């Protein structure tokens, strides 16, 4: 039996150890980590799966990002990881499906990730190149994927995916993160 819970401060070290195991310690040098630097993850979308022994079997996190000069809000999905002893049990799919549903209920419109298109296609993600989205290097453009949670969410949205700044950015735009 597995339980999906919002990640809590007590989970942080265990999740970081899982991410090191799944992706290797050098993961923090990737361009996605530069977009996350100094930006807190979205608490309601950062989930863990705990098993019968109360061990973290999987985790997913989301981070706010901006797209283009207009600063359209989007979510950056990732990382998502499942402990090697639990892979193949559908936990990654469970985390992704649950978190996408929660993101939609929270009013987010756009999700971006860097990952394997054949895997993420089943969750509605497509290559972002057709949307004219760019991502900080070094990133293989074929691995940049996007999904609109509402029809037309990417209409008129193009440009570089960039780091979320701060609350002043929101106040200046006069809009919520989900609607900008």
Image (cartoon, rainbow, N blue to C red):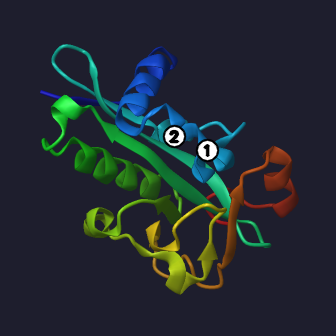
| Position of residue 28 measured from the top left corner of the image (x, y, whole percent) | 58, 38
The quadrant of the picture occupied by the C terminus is bottom right
Question: Which residue is the site of mark 1?
Answer: 33
Query: Residue 27's mark?
Result: 2
State the residue in front, 37 or 61: 37
The quadrant of the picture occupied by the N terminus is top left
State the residue in front, 136 or 131: 136
State the residue in front, 98 or 136: 136
Q: CA distance from mark 2 to mark 1?
A: 8 Å
Q: Please tell me which residue is depicted at 79% across the width and 45% down the height of the picture.
A: 166
| Position of residue 149 measured from the top left corner of the image (x, y, whole percent) | 44, 68
Q: Is residue 178 left or right of residue 55?
A: right
Q: Earlier in the sequence, mark 2 or mark 1?
A: 2
| Position of residue 30 measured from the top left corner of the image (x, y, whole percent) | 58, 48
Q: Quadrant of residue 24?
A: top left
Q: Nearer the viewer, mark 2 or mark 1?
A: 2
Q: Please tell me which residue is depicted at 45% across the width and 53% down the height of the picture.
A: 103
Is residue 149 visible in this depiction of the protein?
no
Q: Residues within 10 Å of mark 2 (few under 14, many from 20)?
A: some
Query: Residue 41's mark?
Result: none
Q: Is 54 located above or below residue 58 in the figure?
A: above
Q: Is residue 110 left or right of residue 172?
A: left
**Secondary structure category for the residue under label 1:** helix
Q: Is 78 located above or below residue 82 in the figure?
A: below
Q: Quadrant of residue 136?
A: bottom right
- Mark 2–mark 1 CB contact (< 8 Å): yes
Q: Is residue 87 left or right of residue 114?
A: left
Q: Please tell me which residue is depicted at 52% across the width and 18% down the height of the picture.
A: 9
Q: Residues within 10 Å of mark 1 (few under 14, many from 20)?
A: some
Is residue 39 visible in this depiction of the protein?
yes
State the residue in front, 132 or 171: 132
């Amino acid at each position: 039996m597995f339980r999906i819970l919002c990640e809590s401060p007590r989970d942080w070290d265990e999740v970081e150890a899982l991410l090191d195991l799944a992706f290797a310690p050098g993961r923090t040098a990737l361009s996605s980590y530069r977009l996350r630097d100094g930006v807190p993850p979205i608490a309601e979308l950062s989930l863990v799966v705990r098993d019968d022994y109360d061990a973290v079997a999987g985790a997913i996190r989301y981070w706010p990002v901006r797209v283009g000069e207009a600063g359209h809000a989007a979510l950056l999905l990732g990382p998502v990881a499942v402990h090697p002893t639990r892979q193949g049990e559908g936990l990654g799919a469970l985390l992704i499906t649950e978190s996408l549903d929660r993101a939609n209920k929270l009013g987010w419109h756009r999700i971006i990730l860097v990952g394997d298109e054949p895997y993420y296609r089943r969750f509605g993600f497509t290559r972002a190149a057709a949307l004219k989205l760019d991502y900080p290097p070094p990133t293989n453009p074929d691995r940049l994927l996007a999904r609109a949670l509402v029809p037309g969410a990417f209409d008129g949205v193009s440009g570089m995916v960039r780091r979320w700044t701060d609350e002043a950015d929101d106040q200046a735009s006069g809009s919520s993160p989900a609607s900008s």
